Amino acid sequence: TPGPVVLRCRYGGPVAKFIGLFIFTIIWDGVVLILFKQDAPVWFKGVFGFFAVIITFAFGHSFLSLFNPRPVLQVSSKHARLGGSVNLNWKMRGQVQKIESFTITLIGQEEATYRRGTDTYTDRAVFHQQVMAEYLHGHIPPMGTCAIKIPRVSMHTWKSQNNKILWLIKVNGKIRKWPDINEEYEIMVLPY
């Protein structure tokens, strides 16, 4: 479709992470509670209890990240071409003044998924990395714009059953004594 497109976070963002961890924490802590009520060995209770504490802390961390400033990214076109460029407009919703450093990076990445026995592994290799916007010492502007320039001598987006070539826009923000912003947005790169 022609015209500007608002990008969606690759993994659903902080809300999806919070909901997933909430469900997992409830199930895990429920199992641990049942173990503690039964006559299980102390070491067994200790191991499961230890992981219950870690999972509960991860859940708390994801809850705090719900209150982070949120990036909204808009590209001038749904597709980019090798050797071409698209404009990226970004704005932050929320308390931008909390962010100490902020970076938007274009990443070209290969993913290979394979099986070893009954286990599935995914290896990732970055073949292109370009910082598009960087603010290191606070005073992060609430909005900005930059050009995404896709290198001509590279690989376009490609997906098969076990392998992928992805182009991502990664947004990272450091916040003192608070969960950091770490989000990925996928863009489609076409052959030239």
Image (spheres, rainbow, N blue to C red):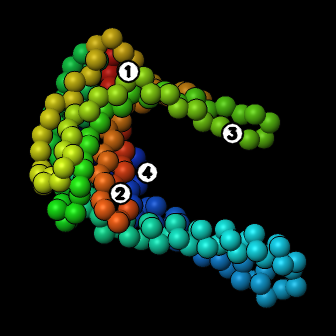
Upstream in the sequence, badge 1 or badge 4?
Answer: 4
Identify the image quadrant of residue 190: top left
**Residue 167 place in picture, x, y as percent:** 37, 31
Identify the image quadrant of residue 68: bottom left
Instruction: Tell me if I can see residue 14 in this picture.
Output: yes
Identify the image quadrant of residue 104: top left
Residue tagged by mark 3?
120
Tell me the kind of residue under disc 1: His
Extreme residue in the front direction: 137
Which type of secondary structure does the marked residue at label 3 adopt? strand
- Give the Cα separation between the discs numbered 2 and 3: 29 Å
Judged left or right of residue 43, residue 139 is left
Crowdedness near tag 3: few (<14), some (14–19) or many (≥20) residues, C-alpha within 10 Å: few
- Contact between marks 3 and 1 (CB within 8 A): the answer is no
**Residue 118 place in picture, x, y as percent:** 78, 41
Judged left or right of residue 106, residue 32 is right
Tell me the kind of residue under disc 3: Thr
Residue tagged by mark 4?
11
Q: In which quarter of the image is the C terminus?
A: top left
Q: Which of 187 and 138 is in front in this view?
A: 138
Residue that appears at 79% across and 88% down: 37
Label placed on residue 156: 1
Upstream in the sequence, badge 3 or badge 1?
Answer: 3
Upstream in the sequence, badge 2 or badge 4?
Answer: 4
Judged left or right of residue 160, residue 94 is left
Upstream in the sequence, badge 2 or badge 3?
Answer: 3
- Contact between marks 4 and 3 (CB within 8 A): the answer is no
Tell me the kind of residue under disc 2: Asp
Upstream in the sequence, badge 4 or badge 3?
Answer: 4
